[in-house]
Amino acid sequence: MKKQPYRRRDLLEYKFFKRIILNRNIQPLAQLLSFLPFIFVVVTGTIGLSLGAKNFSVVFTWILWSVLLALILIPFLGRTWCFMCPIVWPGELIQRKLWSRFGTSRLLNMRWPRVLNNVWLQNFLFIGFAIWMVVLVTQPFVTAVSVVVLISSATVISIFFPRRRFCRHLCPPGLFIGLYSSFSPIEVRVKDQDVCLKPQSEGGCSKECYVGSEKGYGCPWYEFPQNMVSSFDCGLCTECYKTCPLDNIALNVRPFGAELESEDLKRKPDEAWRSLILLSLPVIYTAVLFGPWSWIKNWGDLLLYSTSVGLLQHLFYVLLVIDISLGVFPGLHLLTSASSKLLSGVKDISTKQLFVDYAYAYIPLGLMLWAGFNFSLIMMEWSYIPVVVSDPFGAGWNLLGTTHLPWMPISLPIPIAEIAFVLLGVVLSLKVGYTTLSRTFPEKMQAVRALIPFAVFTVGIAIVFLWFYV
Ligand code: SF4
Ligand code: SF4
Ligand code: SF4
């Protein structure tokens, strides 16, 4: 059996978990249960009061759901959200229940363009969403429209392309969830690769985990468990547990961040950019929402055109977000990679390789910045939750008697918590970074010297982020 790259424990040794994973009804039930609130988001966002803080759609989506994702689900349970996600549910239902009757129809089994077989488009779509963030968090109707756009695009893509192409290459929330789930302590992996490699003549399988069988579907995410070394693109859908005839799939708990330090992880340029873009956005969001420059927030609000904000100001805002996420952060990281190479004294290593490899080390810091941003969000805005539960449309109802609760921010613990999040992120990132560099450089001192510029950049980001809170 191949040596394990880090400590793991298979949760399926406990019969309780195994029974849940193998049950065919749990995923559709979870999807249905999560579909209902999103339908309500669309309804309240469309016909409710157009004031974000008084409308269920905005408060549920951008306070409750995003906080739940960034603070609990992703750090501790990886892609669990994707297991229950309603966005792609209608499309997948059409594929499985309706389209399967048309068998091999070419129109319904289109090939995904090779040029899009990566996360570049998803990176750009995420930035598009990020640019509209101010509008999304203040305008219920825009939130409703984005939910409809997400669900209908996922459905259209699922109609023409088999399996979950939308999830792998397009979904903006998926970009965020996938990247940071690599840090979480949950993973789907084969128990023993040798079992997968056994020839059929000796009792081996027919790769049912990938092609599917009467027991379940082939991996909807186009992952081949036998070779899986990362959780980026495993949607925790549990199909491979159902299809593997040799019971060779484990649901492991592992140390936080272990995958990022693993030698097996294949590091790719599009994923490196994904990490850098997602690292820049909590800093941008914090500056826009909690920073001292209220004009930035106004300029970001496209829908204020008619009143105080002009097209030119909004264009400036758009260029600022694009410039910071695609220019400043990656540019500084490139400079840091070049300095790292120089300081290490090693000539036969490429700056590009350092740029790509080291970008993965920012994942723990990025996750902690998102967690920090969401922590302050929930601390500042929590009191809107009981208000919209009592009066979801902002129509003057008072179902629970909490409609007139005043805004009650809890700002006292924010600076301490932000320092804790950021410190943890810096330490974990440098740990992953040092492990990565020690594999790249043959001597320990070279790796230490190479780490210095990255450490300066990492601490610099941390200081800028904390400046808004402390
Ligand atoms: S990638 Fe997006 S659409 Fe797919 S399951 Fe995850 S959140 Fe849902
Ligand atoms: S079906 Fe099971 S044994 Fe076969 S390749 Fe997949 S995980 Fe391995
Ligand atoms: S089939 Fe297995 S490997 Fe593929 S997404 Fe589902 S859980 Fe992950």
Image: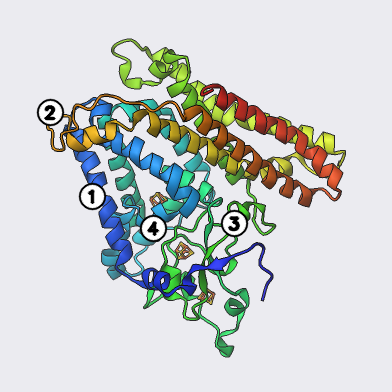
Percent coordinates x, y for residue 133 in the rendering: 39, 29
Q: Which callout, 4 or 2, points to the residue nearer the camera?
A: 2
Residue with the mark numbered 3: 255
Residue with the mark numbered 1: 36
Badge 1 residue CB within 8 Å of ligand 1? no
Q: Earlier in the sequence, mark 1 or mark 4?
A: 1
Q: Amino acid at mark 4?
A: Phe
Q: CA distance from mark 4 to mark 2?
A: 36 Å
Q: Residue at x 63, y 32 (%)?
A: 330
Percent coordinates x, y for residue 190 in the rendering: 55, 70
Q: Which callout, 4 or 3, points to the residue nearer the camera?
A: 3
Q: Is 291 drawn above or below residue 75 in the view shown?
A: above
Q: Which callout, 2 or 1, points to the residue nearer the camera?
A: 2
Question: Can you say which quadrant of the picture contains the N terminus?
Answer: bottom right
Q: CA distance from mark 1 to mark 4?
A: 16 Å
Residue with the mark numbered 4: 83
Badge 4 residue CB within 8 Å of ligand 1? yes
Q: Residue at x 57, y 70 (%)?
A: 226
- In terms of image quadrants, where is residue 242? bottom left
Q: Which callout, 3 or 1, points to the residue nearer the camera?
A: 3
Q: Nearer the viewer, residue 305 or 426?
A: 426
Q: Is residue 237 visible?
A: yes
Neighbour class for label 2 at 10 Å: few (<14), some, many (≥20)? few
